[in-house]
Amino acid sequence: MIEITALGALFGLGIAIFLIIKKVQPVYSLLIGATLGGLIGGANLSSTVGFMIGGVKDIMPSVVRIITAGILAGVLIKSGAANKIAETIIEKLGTKRAILALAISTMLLTSVGVFIDVAVITVSSIALIMGKKANLSRGAVLLAMVGGGKAGNIISPNPNTIAAAGIFKVELSSLMLANLIPAIFGLIATVILASYISKKGEMIDFAEEEINVERPSFFTSILGPIVTISLLSLRPLVGISIDPLIALPMGGIVGTIAMGKTKKLNAYMNYGLGKMTGVAVLLIGTGAVAGIIKASSLKDVTVSLLEKSGLPAYLLAPISGIVMSAATASTTAGTSVASETFAPTLLALGIKALYGAAMVHAGATVLDHLPHGSFFHATAGATEIKVGDRLKLIPYETMIGLVLAVVSTIIYGVIL
């Protein structure tokens, strides 16, 4: 069987990263990188395409689940449920605890299935109003939302978690629960760091008051996510396995009925599908790259380097997540490439599937906010922060991600 050289795989990955940084469409960047990596690594064109298709096939179960997750996401966002959840939390905690309120609200939204960038955009309008009342800087307000979103992301039924669970073949609900303690530590780190910079940078001197629009009740808003999480929890609780492909859309449908908006369900589904399509297609690109890397000697070289360095094998999990998130500036792409590439190696090293998935997933939050990704620019636009001030937040965002990764690694690499 043809084996691609580690150098070829690295070159292909490097080409993909270079193209992404140069703003070439990420999916095509990944496909180009995968193709060149295979050819330079010693495979012929036919074998290279075969490896790429094989990698895509491996990622397809996660792609299907992610597409169905669009129903719940679309319902939460377009019905006003996400806004209602955020508004209720912020209202209950009040202006004196503004930073905590913003962090918790974005954490909860991402943890119930809203994309992190959408969660930040959803909360941003009320966040700016609260930030002005509390005399906070734009940077502090944005960091509170981003940090809370990162914490919620690793305990969510979002595409990154779905991808890791599918590739490592673990229950989605188990993986969501696995990083709960790291998420709490991440929330604490977010509040501390956002409070530290609360008076640094541009202060919020103007914020448009939000026009009052009809919102569903808090109970009906949260009911859909509760149904989804309850269905996913049946496996560890009573041994009944409900696949995310069923649980995620079921939550969205129940939520729509509870809010009395069944006539709008099709519109919600169309919106959710639009949000998930980009992620699903991106995963096809990551699958192609992962197929090339899996067919290469890169895994063996990586393990050999770890052994020679004297570092424990479990560090491969968070490090791979960190590196791939830096390469793609995406939690989902970073998680899926790292999982698809190194899951077999981690399992062969004796690391339990759930532990490996949790550490990879947490590692992928460390550098997913770099400027060559869309998240950096979407969140900057949501809070109207200057590019210079947005760049200054990167070290703080990285520290929050490191807290998530380090705590997860301590639990699943050192303690367990």
Image (cartoon, rainbow, N blue to C red):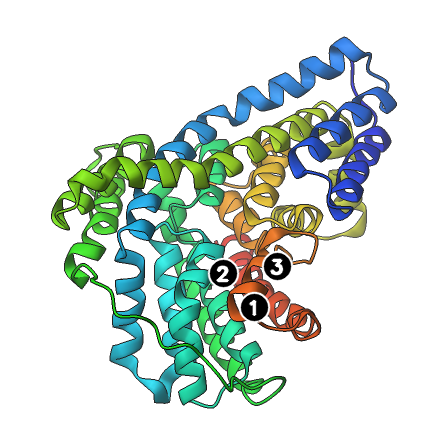
Q: In the displayed structure, does residue 159 sit left or right of residue 5?
A: left
* Distance CA(mark 2)–CA(mark 3): 16 Å
Nearer the N terminus, badge 2 or badge 1? 2
- Numbered mark located on residue 377 in the image: 3
**Residue 113 on image: x %, y %:** 36, 49
Disc 3 marks which amino acid?
His
Q: Residues within 10 Å of mark 3 (few under 14, many from 20)?
A: some
* Distance CA(mark 3)–CA(mark 1): 19 Å
**Residue 89 on image: x %, y %:** 28, 72
**Residue 270 on image: x %, y %:** 35, 36
Q: Secondary structure at mark 2?
A: helix
Residue located 44% across and 55% down the image: 118
Nearer the N terminus, badge 3 or badge 1? 3
- Numbered mark located on residue 400 in the image: 1
- Numbered mark located on residue 354 in the image: none
Q: Are marks 3 and 1 in contact (CB under 8 Å)?
A: no
Above/below status of 219 relative to 19: below
Nearer the N terminus, badge 2 or badge 3? 2
Name the residue beneath numbered marker 2: 150
Above/below status of 238 relative to 91: above
Residue located 63% across and 30% down the image: 285
Foreground disc of the pair 3, 1:
3
Foreground disc of the pair 2, 3:
3
